[in-house]
Image: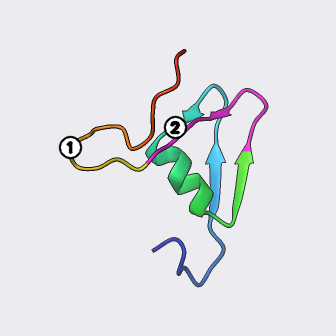
Amino acid sequence: MLLNAKTPVYAYVPPGVKAASAGALIAMAADKIYMVPTAQIGASEPRHRTSRWLTTPRPT
């Protein structure tokens, strides 16, 4: 839907917000991403329906 939009699609990440998981994927599908200096964009990873990791988790 976003990728086939006939008008430009913009993502905005407001102050103090973290676009993670689905938020990160939606932002990456937009034509442009606008973020304030305090906003963050996090990791996202496709998951199998069993919710098991597709990649090996990194130690934190």
- Image quadrant in which you'd find residue 56: top left
Which residue is found at the position 50% from the left and 45% from the top?
23
Q: Residues within 10 Å of mark 1 (few under 14, many from 20)?
A: few
Q: Is residue 22 above or below residue 59?
A: below
Q: Position of residue 53 (x, y in %)?
A: 36, 38
Q: Is residue 41 magenta?
A: yes
Helix or strand or loop: what does disc 1 sit on?
loop
Q: Position of residue 27 (x, y in %)?
A: 59, 53
- In the picture of the structure, the residue carrying the numbered disc 2 is 20
Report the amino acid beneath label 1.
Thr
Q: Which quadrant of the structure image shows residue 13?
A: top right
Residue 50 got which mark?
1
Determine the residue located farthest toward the top in the rendered image: 60
Residue at figure coordinates x 39%, y 44% from the top left: 54
Q: Position of residue 1 (x, y in %)?
A: 45, 74
Tell whether position 52 is magenta: no
Alpha carbon distance from label 1 to label 2 = 20 Å
Q: Residue furthest right?
A: 37
Task: Specify the farthest residue to the front.
Answer: 56
Looking at the picture, does residue 14 appear above or below residue 45? above
Q: Which residues are magenta?
A: 35-45
Q: Between label 1 and label 2, give the one nearer the viewer.
A: 1
In the rendered image, residue 28, in percent from the top left (x then y), is placed at 61, 56
